[in-house]
Image: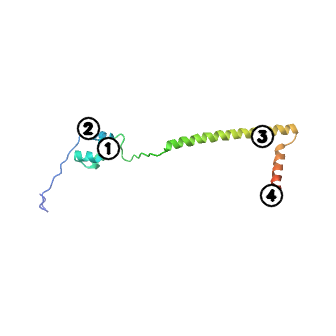
Amino acid sequence: MDKKTGQRIRQREVRVFSEGIKKQTVRDLEQGLCSVKSASIELGISTTAVYKWINQYSRYLQKSRKMVVEDQSEAYRSQELEKRIKELEAALGRKQMELDLLEKVIELAGKEYKTDLKKNLLKNRSSGSEKAKE
């Protein structure tokens, strides 16, 4: 009895569960055989205790682990972006080869006609744009 209130003190029963029971309960939870609430009721413990067991013994259901489920996961998106980068690099390479070829043609034509076609082309292009502005 409590000396101040005169009420009877109820001592709490301390129960210790074996590791086997804890692991089995967690396995049942992982397999979907029971819920945290039903396990806590059946064993006469709090749901907090069951969650502690999950954090301690579970291979799948762990605290602070988030599973993100999306239509297109980040890994899929990364693969698509890498594929797009490769396609763009290939297109850029083709364009660079075309540019190199055209420059070589201009150079060879310039040697054939004994004139600097690059200079003549650039002069004509700039004067043509000025005429268009007037």
Q: Earlier in the sequence, mark 4 or mark 2?
A: 2
Dot 1: within a 10 Å radius of its alpha carbon, few (fewer than 14), some, or many (20 or more) residues?
Answer: many
Q: Secondary structure at mark 3?
A: helix
Residue carrying label 1: 54
Q: Is residue 27 left or right of residue 80?
A: left
Q: CA distance from mark 4 to mark 1?
A: 77 Å
Mark toward the viewer: 4 or 2: 4
Q: Position of residue 12 (x, y in %)?
A: 18, 51
The residue identified by callout 2 is 20
Secondary structure beneath disc 2? helix
Amino acid carrying label 4: it is Lys
N-terminal of the pair, mark 1 or mark 3, is: 1
- The amino acid marked with disc number 3 is Glu
Mark before the other along the chain sequence, 1 or 2: 2
Query: In the image, what residue occupies the spot 27% across and 38% down?
Result: 24
Looking at the picture, tell me which residue is in the foreground, 93 or 14. Answer: 93
The span from disc 1 to disc 3 (Cα, nearest Å) is 69 Å
Relative to 64, is 21 above or below? above
User: Which mark is drawn over residue 133?
Assistant: 4
Crowd class of label 3 (few under 14; some 14 to 19; many from 20; radius 10 Å): few
Task: Reply above or below: 133 against 73.
Answer: below
The answer to which of marks 4 and 3 sits earlier in the sequence is 3
Q: Looking at the picture, does residue 9 appear above or below residue 117?
A: below
Q: Residues within 10 Å of mark 2 (few under 14, many from 20)?
A: few
